[in-house]
Image (cartoon, grey):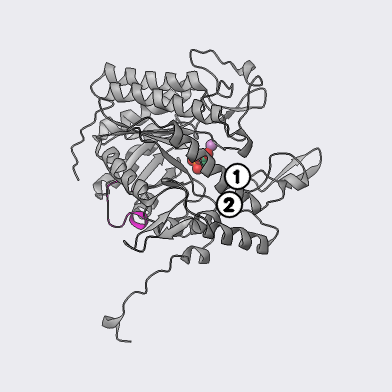
Amino acid sequence: MRPDLEVPLPVPDDAWRTRPAAQQPDWPSVSELRDAVRRLESLPVLVPAEECERLRLRMADVARGRSFLLQGGDCAETFDMITPEGVGATRGTLRSMAATLSDALAMPVVTMGRTAGQYAKPRSRNTETRGGVTLPVYRGDAVNGTEFTPEARTPDPGRLLRSRHVAAVTIGYLRELADEGDEFFVSHEGLLLDYEAALTRTDPRTGRRWAGSGHLLWIGERTRDLDGAHVEYFSTVDNPIAVKLGPTADADTVLRLADRLDPEREPGRLTFISRMGSRAVRHVLPELVSRVAAEGFPTAWVCDPMHGNTVTAPSGHKTRYFNTVMDEIRGFFEVHRTLDTVAGGLHLEMTGRDVTECVGGTGGVSADDLADRYESACDPRFNRAQSLEVAARVAELASKSPGPLRVSPTIYF
Ligand code: PEP
Ligand code: CO
């Protein structure tokens, strides 16, 4: 064919299947996986496209500095922990935090749970050894069970169907809890591509394609490979999406991610969630934010002050210190103030329950208390008091100085 007649072929929606997919379970039975996927494909999606579309508008406001995002919930939701009390406590805590932040920042807060789908975890090792026995690592309730037995740890595709079911129950209850005019969105890491693709639908009227498992999905720090399956899948859906960026992210990679995932440069489409750690945030983040802004990407920036600040306590518990988390939040705001860009929101691992998983805050959880109520199936979460305190401290930052939380950047789009 003459080169001037060559038209690029459209990339098929399932092109992700041809790319390497990191962090996928080793399902023992391909036919069981196929059955589960077929069943998921035949069921209704969990969130309507209109709500995803509406969230894109809300996230565009976040990117412009006209709204602030508060995103929070469990590191790993478990099927058994989903109770009306638990869902209600976390929802209530987020609602109180949002009220505090909205007052202090004098702008609307977009409230979003890490919920109704946060059942799959990326892990740094494939196996775990205890007492000389080696088994597959726990990858979240969507894949296997926490119990250290061969039965529980063997990946079971039937769990993908249970995930959809528990997510539907969670969303149903959250809708019951909604006050009038009270928006609440759900989000999770889009890790298991078989699950996500099986719940993705193309709207025949608009031709737009929506991941139907949650309003916003994000790509984790371990699966954001530019040539990998996750970036490919995410490039084919129209939802608002986010990508986590850790301290090893370099500006060129970040710009290429922005190009792949938001080629039309549409405000509200792409959010970067910075999770640098308190020590790195002030020197790693500035170049990333300034290059993205200089290239004209209307990306929102949100701070996850949890994942770069995980340490092991003397008791062996994974934990996070309240003051270190606050320091990363302060660093994040400082960077944006210096660059005259928008500090768009917070992404927290938290729960409304009175757990003892993170150390510090005025509630006085000490390293010696960690064993008391350490209930997380994965990373340590702020409890209700610690979560409310973060909101109060951010509000204090906003009131003390006209600088750090400034809302009107000089870039307009
Ligand atoms: C998480 O959000 O629980 C997580 C694994 O984060 P990250 O991808 O940033 O490490
Ligand atoms: Co986590």
Vertical position of residue 359 compared to residue 118: above or below = above
Query: Would you place residue 403 above or below residue 378 in this image?
Result: above
Residue at position x 44%, y 31% in the image: 177
Q: Tell me, yes or no, whether the highlighted magenta stretch contains residue 329.
A: no
Whole-number angstrom distance, CA of label 1 to CA of label 2: 7 Å
For image coordinates 52% across by 64% down, the residue present is: 17
Question: Can residue 402 be seen by looking at this rendering?
Answer: yes
Which amino acid lies under the numbered mark 2 shown in the image of this protein?
Gln
Graded by Cα atoms within 10 Å as few (under 14), some (14 to 19) or many (20 or more), the crowding at tag 2 reads some
Magenta region: 259-269
129 vs 263, left or right, is: right
Main SS category, magenta section? loop
Residue with the mark numbered 2: 23
* Whether residue 385 is situated above or below residue 78 in the rendered picture: above
Q: Is mark 1 within 8 Å of ligand 1?
A: no
Instruction: Say left or right for 252 vs 200.
Output: left
Query: Which residue does the image show at 47% across and 20% down from the upper left?
Result: 323
Residue 336 in picture, x, y percent from top left:
29, 33
Count of marks placed on residues: 2
For the residues labelled 1 and 2, say whether their Cβ atoms are less than 8 Å apart: yes
Identify the secondary structure beneath mark 1: loop
Residue 123: assigned label: 1
Q: Quadrant of residue 318?
A: top right
Does mark 2 have its CB less than 8 Å from ligand 1? no
Amino acid residing under circle 1 = Arg
Q: Does residue 276 appear anywhere in the picture?
A: no
Q: Which badge, 1 or 2, is on the more N-terminal residue?
A: 2
Between 170 and 295, which is closer to the camera in this rendering? 170
Q: Which mark is residue 131?
A: none
- Determine if the magenta segment contains residue 264: yes
